[in-house]
Image: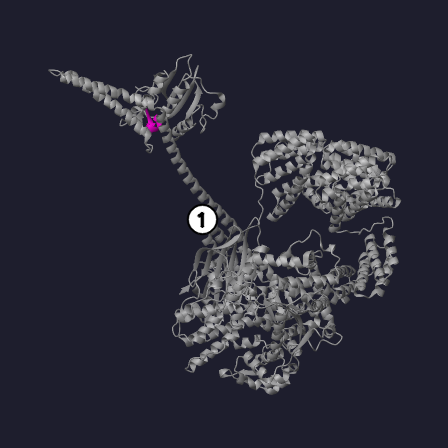
Amino acid sequence: MSHSVPILDQLADYDVTQLVAGPPALYRGVNKEGARALFVVMEDGPKEHERRAQLEHAYALRARLAAPWAARPHALLRENGCFALALRDPGGTLLRARWRSPPKLERFLRAAIAIAAAVESLHEAGLIHCDLNPEHILLDNADESACLLGFGRAMMADRSDREANLHRACSGSIEYMAPELCGRMERMLDARADLYSLGCLFYEMLTGVLPFTGVDRMALAHAQLAKQPMRPSAYALGLPRQVEAIVMKLLAKNPNDRYQSAAGLQADLTRCLNAGTERHAAAAFPLDLHASVAISRHAGALYGRRGQLDALDATLRRVSTSGAVELVFVAGYSGSGKSALVDQWASAIGTTSISYARGVCEQLDSTQPYGALARALERLIRPILGQEDASFTATRTRLCARMGERAEILYGLLPDLKLILGDLSSDDEAQFNVDRALYLRTIADLLKGVLQPARPLVLFFDDMQWVDEGTLTVLDYLTRDGELSHVMLIAAFRSNEVTPGHALARLIAEAKDRHQMIAVEPLERGDMARLVGDTLGCKLDASLPVVDIIREKTGGNPFFTIQLAAELASEGLIEFEEKGALRLRDVDRIRAKLYSDNVADLMLLRFARLGEAARYALQVFASLGGAAKSADLAAAASLTKHGLEASLREAINASLIDRDADMLRFTHDRIREAAYASMGESEQAALHLDIGRRLAMRLREDEPSDEIFVVANQINRGASRIVSLEERKRFAYLNLLAGERAKAATAYTSALVYFETAAALIDESTDEDTAQWTEFHRADVECLIGTLAPAEARLVALGRKPVSMALRAELTRLTASLQTAQNRQIQAITTGLDFLVRLGVNIEERPSDSEVDRLYGQLRRELGERSVAQLAENAWVEDPVWRCALDVLADLIPPALFFNANLLDVILLNLTLLSLRHGLSDSAAYGFVCLNLVFAERYGDYRTGYEFAQLAVDVVDRCKRSRYKARIYMRFGSLVIPWSRPAQDAMPYIEQAKQVAKADGDLVFDVSGARNVASVLLLAGRPLDEVMAEAKNGLNVARLSRFFLYSGVFRAQIQLVEQLGDAGRRDAADQTGDEEYRRDIDAVRANNTSVGFAYWTCTLQASFISGDFEAALEAEVAARRSIGASRMFLELIEYRFFGALTRAKLCETAATAHEQAAHREALDAHCAALAAWAHVGPANLMGRAALVDAEVARLDGRAREAEHLYNKAIRHAHERRILHVEALACELAAGFHRQQGRGAIADAYLRDASHAYAWWGANAKVRAMTERGIKTEPSAGAPMPAFDYPSQQLDIAAIIKASSALSSEIVLSRLIETLALVTLEHAGAQRCVLALNHKGVLQIHAEAVTRAELAEVNVVRREISSEDLPLTLVRTAIRTGQPLALGSAATEGGYTRDDYVRRTQAKSVLCLPLLKQGGLVGVIFLENRLSESAFTEDKIAVLSVLGAQAAIALENARLYQDLVEQNQRIAHTEEALRNAMAELARVSRLTTMGQLVASIAHEISQPMSAIHSSASAAGHWLEREPPALEEARKMLTLVAGESLRASSIIHGIRELAKNAPPTLTVFDLRSAVAEALLLAGAEVEHHHVEVVNVIVPGFFVKGDRVQIQQVALNLIVNAVEAMASVDSRARVLELSSRHVDGGRAEITVADSGHGLQACVEGSLFEPFVTTKATGMGLGLSICRSIVERHGGTLQFEPNTPYGARFVFSLAAAFAAPGETSRSSISRPDSPPA
């Protein structure tokens, strides 16, 4: 049908026909000259941006597109709101229109071949189509030529910028989309994705249906990922099996299982077509044979290796039976199959019989300490994390028992070991004096702890020709360890590369009695024939023609054989004949191939054929080693993740490298060597240096990982090309760090290499410090390896230089050690005394925490039962030597304050211990006053710290004169008292200290003392003018003494006062010029000691009070750098206080969730510190802690708690006169109340804040508040934190769909089912298991499984087991708290031993822990047995988000279920309670009736007596003659009346007694009350009570007559009994009623008794409260319950003038039963008639 496209004037000359309706629409046009063209047309609107971008992308690819296989774009057209792409028209018909029903087989094959040829051309052009579907393929009329179009989503295979293209590709036709594309799998997207689309197309062409269907895009994606299609023959009967096999191979989920190229597909389709044209069905043949040869998947290790396998078996049997440790060397040429021999032998034995781990030595990192050992041990211990709890605990206990705290020295080598054992001590590894023997013993103990006698341990070290020193040393040690058992050590090496001088050769010679040698020889002819036959997919006899020539070239080397066979096949020199036979096409040409004489040359040739990008990526890879993580390789190559994938795709397709999850490996070390050898030495050095530079950029030097060795090794191989001085300095320092770590790991030879390289890079003129330390470490390592002469020469030379004190200490230690080792003890002693002559005590410069703990424990023991105060009775020190020692130690305290916390604590503890042993001194007292740093700050014992400080004051007071007295007074007043007593208590001691210092002329003390005084004043909230005076005094003294470091602190204190008191104007008279001011400020800003901390804390305080929160944050962060050097300084309190307030403010204004979380984390840390201190010293800290807690409560929405805490802070600060805290608390409370909408209250708080600021002297703050006005509401509409997730990480549609599904369910069982289905569908899994944590035990609650058409959910409840889940993975995920994904569980690492994995041979698995607030809610396990690496990082990111929501939803559903069950229980309880109350009411009625039995009997006896008398009289009247009938009739009438009266009484009793349900009726209240009076008549008469019943007749009420009678009867009886003891006045019972507003009736029962006591009135209606001696206390309680159930009230009030009144209300009824209520409605207030 022809159309016109009037909106495109440029197409006016074309007669167009619509082929696809779109959007975008596809038209075919023919102009007047007969020229044809295709046009893709769409509207050019804003909503069509993505489609327009696709057309532009297709146009940009036109240079790569060519006829006849592509419809090449030639123009972009835009006009009149339309956008069009003009294409060359090759003719033909769209596949969608041409293929409307399944064709004959021959036609299908011709069309399929044509399509495959077009796709092959596409791939050869370097493109991946990504959207092959029936609307993007044109077929000619003969079905022999195909043309592709629709390139809007195509990708270039060699491009690195793939993210945008990948996003575009993923939006294609999902019915034909490959799993790795629609699932964004963790694998390189390559041309095989198009082959999967061809599989979908061919399936549809053959059957008429698509292989997969779904209700929406997500369901289709799930089907592509997790479902297997029906076989085509189920729809197309009689379809040849070979054609069906081709289609099914194309539809393989794993790209490695598909056709590897369109060429291979085309060849097999052609073979099927040829078989059909020859009129016989195609015989079965191996599919994609070309790819099978190219990949060369078959290994040659098991060909002709029976003898070697038997030798390994025999060794293992000996190890198993005898428990011995045996060392086996496997030797052979490169490519002989050593690695495959051991690996396949171990695989055949099985992991249930042995524990097997493999470590490979790398050629280029042989200096990395324990490289191969670490790789082996890592694989050995990783599975422990997956053990079940009992086994995990047993293993951990066993390891701890073996290694103890020594295990920590291996944490840097084996990070997983720390996850297993945790922190074993509070100290770091430095506590161990690690030598090689200790390190080796610890490694051996690790193996002993892991070993299970029933499963011998096999450790395989491969490529030992490149072994590092550490691994070789361990190997030797393990064979000598007499306690180790059941271990088989295998070491494989290239026999042609291990010379007699090689370290391995020396070990072999030394261990000749402790090892055996297995040689791996070349293959024999028969084994070669089998290898070639299996490789090429032919029978043994068919391979014989080529075996001899291949063997001639390869010498029987298996690797060379496979590679040569593949090369010959790829060049067409081996022909594949019918029935699988082979023949050589050109023997002479084969012999003439130069490369074939050497496998290295062959590998170089294959390497040279790769593209430039692939070659570069492989060269970088080869420079790193034989294996690397993809992220590491990308960083080394300076490529993005996708750029690396693109670069390596060609190498992966050629089977040069393998990928296992995130790890990349060369398939053989010969390939790596070929890639590396492709560069010259200069190129190699340059590349190594570039790699080192790139990796160094991401290196974190403080992390205990082995990456520093990798970086150093790369740099060192290119060190000759480093020119920059800065680079030489930095890389020298890196080598120094690497050497230190190697030395710490006792890898001394490796360490020496790093130190020597560092020394070669710099000298002292370049970097004096690094150079000197390098020389020291070189000498240290030389001592350790036994080269003592050069070590001593180096130490002597270094000792003559001016070195740092730290280095001098180390030099002294090392020199003394060397002299001791050479039996020169006197020199060693002299060396030590030279350094510590004034002390006489050996104290390391940087003591460890354990040393502090040891001394602290020793001091505690020596104190014993004595109190600290008793130490004042000790004698004074008499020995002048020890007094000198005490003096020197005391003098070391000030510098130690700025140097090292542990050193200071060790000095203080040593000083105290020496004083305990040798006597007191004033210098010892100075140590005592500082001991609060140890007892309080380190160990939290503030009481003992205070006691020692008080002892110091007592001791120094006994001295007439002491140079320490002022310091002790000042420290006690300024740094001890404020932590436990009110700050004002410190002032007497401070004043005394100032007087003593002034008398002594101690300028240095004056400076530090003034600084502390100002700090106390600020802490106490004293007026700012006092602070200013002290700070100015301190500044003047600092100038005089040239103590410039403290000048900056005083400047900061002055600046704080000026900023708050004078609007930031500095007094010019207090400055000697801007230059001096800037010098002081710059010096203190850059200082990381306590003075720097004080400066930044003052800045923080001033900035926050002034409202500059960004400046406050900057100051808080800067102060944090020196917090460790500011122990117990008072600024620490204000830092925590104002830091917390600053973070609280910034939590509200944070731009992102990440910023908000960071602020909240810092806030919580400040809050915790303040809370702990407030517990110890509430006087100064309680108000501060309360104010911070108030801010936290406000942020958390706890308004009532926040209000209480603000008031608490204000009250505390006001009582203690801490003015600035009071002012801040009032100001912040004002902001809180204003947020709550209480403006007037907020204004009141602001006024109080202004007054407090004024008293404090913060005039600038007061002015600012006045200028700002009283209202300070925060601006409305503040932006909420934004959560910005990258689009490539989160599938928004999936999250919305899943979130909607989860949020729509609250019932736990339905939620579980929904969660399982949603997770299964989104993840692209075949199976999903949901296990929930129930009291610490995981129970499976649901299992979802993908079936052919839909997913089924089985809701169950059973404990997890290995039948359902891989427990190893589940436990590992739970213990790490992180998702654990495996691309191929059956082949990856230690998980292959898991029972479930071994049984199911699982491929892709994912275990996702569901956590809520750190607690385990459950686990989701996902599995896909069709695809490898199905669960990508993107999917895991989405699933993690869904998992977090699921955890919350599950917890909410659980709470909802608990609530439902609780409500049901409450309902049952309430029902039982109602029944009990009803029964209790009935019992109460019966009890009342029992009490009234006499009255009831009396009431009944009266009519009975009257009946008897009247009946007798009637008889007498009738006996008369004549009978007096009239008189008899009167008597009988009287009998009838009295009988009715008795019946009425009995009826009332029966109604009260029976247990009938309440019945709401309208009844006359007077008659009901009259019946109650009748029942109580005897009691009334017995107590002589006068009844006044003024309840009018016809007073109708609505309710249950019996229950209201019970109320009336109970109140009547109570009233009668209340008047029983009244004798002085009449006993009157008054009953009355009246109508009140609201249609209610009010009934009053009043008596003239004594009334009730006031103490009883409040609890009168509570159960079991009674005023009677024999009462139960239930009557009034039941009465109130009855009245309240009627909607009324029962109340008590005193009667006037005596007695009590009980008033109850009921619903009034203004008409009798059966009457209309018109009159009552019209006159509701009219009295009854």
Viewer-nearest residue: 1613 or 1621: 1621
**How many residues crowd mark 1 within 10 Å: few (<14), some (14–19), many (20+)?**
some
In which quadrant of the rendered view does residue 1100 lie? top right
Where residue 1153 appears, x then y in whole percent? 59, 48
Q: Amino acid at mark 1?
A: Val
Where residue 1083 appears, x then y in whole percent? 79, 45
Q: Please tell me which residue is depicted at 68% across the width and 39% down the height of the picture.
A: 1173
Where residue 1557 appears, x then y in whole percent? 33, 34
Viewer-nearest residue: 1687 or 169: 1687
Position of 1587 with respect to 566 (left or right) is left
In which quadrant of the rendered view does residue 404 lie? bottom right
Q: Is residue 333 above or below residue 1453?
A: below
Question: Which element carries disc 1, helix, strand or loop?
Answer: loop
Q: For the N terminus, which image quadrant?
A: bottom left
Q: Is residue 1454 above or below residue 1016?
A: below
Where residue 1359 appears, x then y in whole percent? 49, 56
Viewer-nearest residue: 1061 or 16: 1061
Range of residues picked out in magenta: 1596-1605
